[in-house]
Image: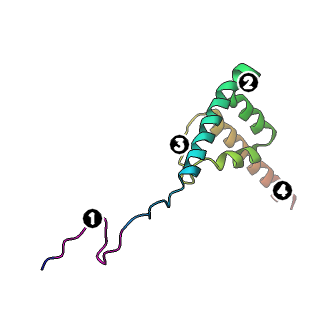
Amino acid sequence: MVKELNNNKNRNGVKLGRPKGSTNRHAISLINQINLAIEEAVQILPTRHGVTLAEILADSLKANPTATLQAIGKYCPPDINVNVQHSPFTEALQTINDRIITINDDVDELQ
């Protein structure tokens, strides 16, 4: 006798996948509502407060770049790969790198 395999079961007859009701639809709905509220808030910024999100980020990056980048990084995928050439950001990073090398060289000369 040939045993027919059900596509929803493994070889032992146990159902595959998540059990019914295991997904938290309320949490997913809440996350969607938060995302929509954030999008709406970003659109309201220029009209109500005369400032854009880009301007707020620029001011924050100027005041405290480390904390700002850490906060932004929490919302970015961990395996992001950026290839940018000849942008103000890469030029700023190059300038910072050059200054660090100069300072390290000066410290080495003093020792």
| Residue under label 1 | 7
Label 4 and label 3: CA atoms lie apart by: 32 Å
Tell which tag, 4 or 1, sits nearer the viewer.
1
Q: Amino acid at mark 4?
A: Val
Residue 72 spot, x, y in % from top left = 67, 45
Label 2 and label 3: CA atoms lie apart by: 29 Å
Give the SS element for disc 3: loop
Give me the disc on residue 107: 4
Label 4 and label 1: CA atoms lie apart by: 68 Å
Magenta segment range?
A: 3-15
Tell which tag, 3 or 1, sits nearer the viewer.
1
Instruction: Choose between 51 and 89: the one closer to the eye.
Output: 51
Give the SS element for disc 2: loop
Label 2 and label 4: CA atoms lie apart by: 42 Å
Disc 3 residue crowd, few under 14, some 14–19, many 20+, Cα 10 Å: few
Q: Amino acid at mark 2?
A: Val
Classified by dominant secondary structure, the portion drawn in magenta counts as loop
Quarter the C terminus occupies: bottom right
